[in-house]
Amino acid sequence: MPVFILSRLLSAALVLLGVSCLVFLLIHLVPGDPVEVMLGEAAQPADREALRHALGLDQPLLAQLLHYFEGLLRLDLGTSLQSKRPIAELLWQRIPATAELAAAALAVAVVIAFPLGILAAVRKDSLWDYGAMSVSMFGVSIPNFWLGPVLILVFSVWLGWLPVSGREEAASIVLPAVTLGMALAAVLARMVRSALLEVLHEDYVRTARAKGLPERVVILRHAMRNALLPVVTVLGLQLGVLLGGAVVTEMVFSWPGLGELTIESIQRRDYPVVQACVLLISVSYVVVNTLTDLVYGWLDPRVRLGGRS
Amino acid sequence: MRIWLPGAILLIWAICALLGPMWVGDPNHIELQRILAPPGPAGWLGFDDLGRPVWQRLVVGAQTSFMVSVMVVAVTAVIGALLGTTSGFVGGWIDHLLVRIIDIFLAFPGILLAIALAGVLGPGINNVVIALSVVGWVGFARLARAQVLTLKHREHVQAATALGVRRSRIIIRHLLPLIVAPLIVEGTFAVAGAVIAEAGLSFLGLGVQPPAASWGSMIRDGTRYMLMAPHLVLAPGVALMLVVLGVNLLGDRLRDWMDVRSRP
């Protein structure tokens, strides 16, 4: 077990190092002079030099990289060009909204996916199965930046049940969470179905039935528990899709989270903030996935022994 | 039989993309008296906020999404497959390095890296292709590598190695043909992903620039007039959904048909 934990942590650290390097390089991909792009052509030469110096862009690349990592270790992400405030402070304000949205979307996905997937598996090849899988196919194929406006049109504009956008009321989260959770629900429902179908033929399921247990207990207590492992793996990986989708969903609903900050900063050419947002979202994804891996190793010996070989 | 529905959707998409712009007329033709006009005899999908015909713009948008997704998938499939097969076959530190690089790219959530790249490179369709390609090769590389790892100890590869066949020839003649089926399936789903990603970037204002049309930018512009003219959002959205649905269904059928999972 210690070997497993150590190897997982080491590879996570390597990935984080690579992610930070890639995010660092982002600003060097700006075509032409990044300082000119950020300040505009009308800027005074003195201001340009000041910004160039503040961002360290007048130093050699390696020195910049070292300076950047030094800042990261002190949790100093620099200053926003627009608001002149520390970027760490900006991010800190936005984290709760994004975390809330992601958690709510995850809840929506789980609540939709499990009944749908279980129903499809238990009644395989029936009308229920085809129906559930068709719903899931649609769910995967509807982009969230379209589903969002359509939901607003129906539930806010026509029916007037829910707020159009923002985060002022408690009910504000419903539409963004459904919009973001739908695609995940679709993927998850398919996973639940196939994972459950695989274990339904196992001997222990037959034994459970032979004992005379009610079908509900057989499915939920015996089959579902073992089917859960691959499903949760997918859930961990899909969290990345969820966080990426949150960026778009937040724009649709003016949800004041990290995604909205990312896009606003892109529009204002406030690249240091863009870098910081991308870094924070990616790092949290890596951390969550590493934690999931570790929890698995603890739950299921097959995973940690496989990890060692 | 069940391949006909997705096949038909995709055929219409391709025809609209390749031939459409020639016969639908000018998508930027403005009719001021028809601003936000709903679907009717003058234009069967109505007119947008500048009085431009929605149907014409939809066809031009089909071209944008088709060109971008085909280009992105072609580029990323070739690069990813070559990198993945080579690295898996050669092994050693090269393979180790590639696995690390893949891990790093996979650590960026979904479309986020593409958004950041497109944002930094600046708006424009070329930068969308670049951004999506930088993100897209990883899936192909990982798949190709995994396939090659299971194939490289097969007898025919060992025989070829024993006969002194060059590595590049073994990869191209003896390994790639065996992994084409899963790559095609992956490529189909990658088209669906690229279509959504292009529209998503254009929705965020990072893709095609006005007056060019993309389904994503049409949805974005339409949301401002959703109360008066819902057709501006519904038309491009339904087109987008149908194409993605068609591609996904085709991918599903291909996967069943080529029986990808039961292969090594």
Image (cartoon, rainbow, N blue to C red):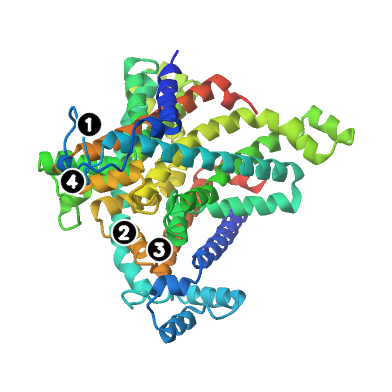
Mark 2 → mark 4, Cα distance in angstroms: 21 Å
Chain at numbered mark 1: B
Task: Look at 14% across and 46% down and name the residue there.
Answer: A162
Mark 3 → mark 1, Cα distance in angstroms: 44 Å
**Amino acid, disc 1:** Gly
Label 3 environment density (alpha carbons within 10 Å; few <14, some 14–19, many ≥20): many
Front-most of residues B82 and B107: B82
The answer to whether tags 2 and 1 share a subunit is: no
**Amino acid, disc 3:** Cys
Task: Look at 61% across and 47% down and name the residue there.
Answer: A307
Front-most of residues B54 and B228: B54
Q: Which residue is mark 3?
A: A277
**Amino acid, disc 2:** Glu
Image quadrant where residue B167 sits: top right
Q: Are marks 2 and 1 in contact (CB under 8 Å)?
A: no
Callout 4 secondary element? loop
Mark 1 → mark 4, Cα distance in angstroms: 18 Å
Labelled disc at residue B225: 4
Query: Sequence order check: which comes first, mark 3 or mark 2?
Result: 2
Which mark's residue is nearer the viewer, 3 or 1?
Answer: 1
Q: Which residue is mark 2?
A: A260
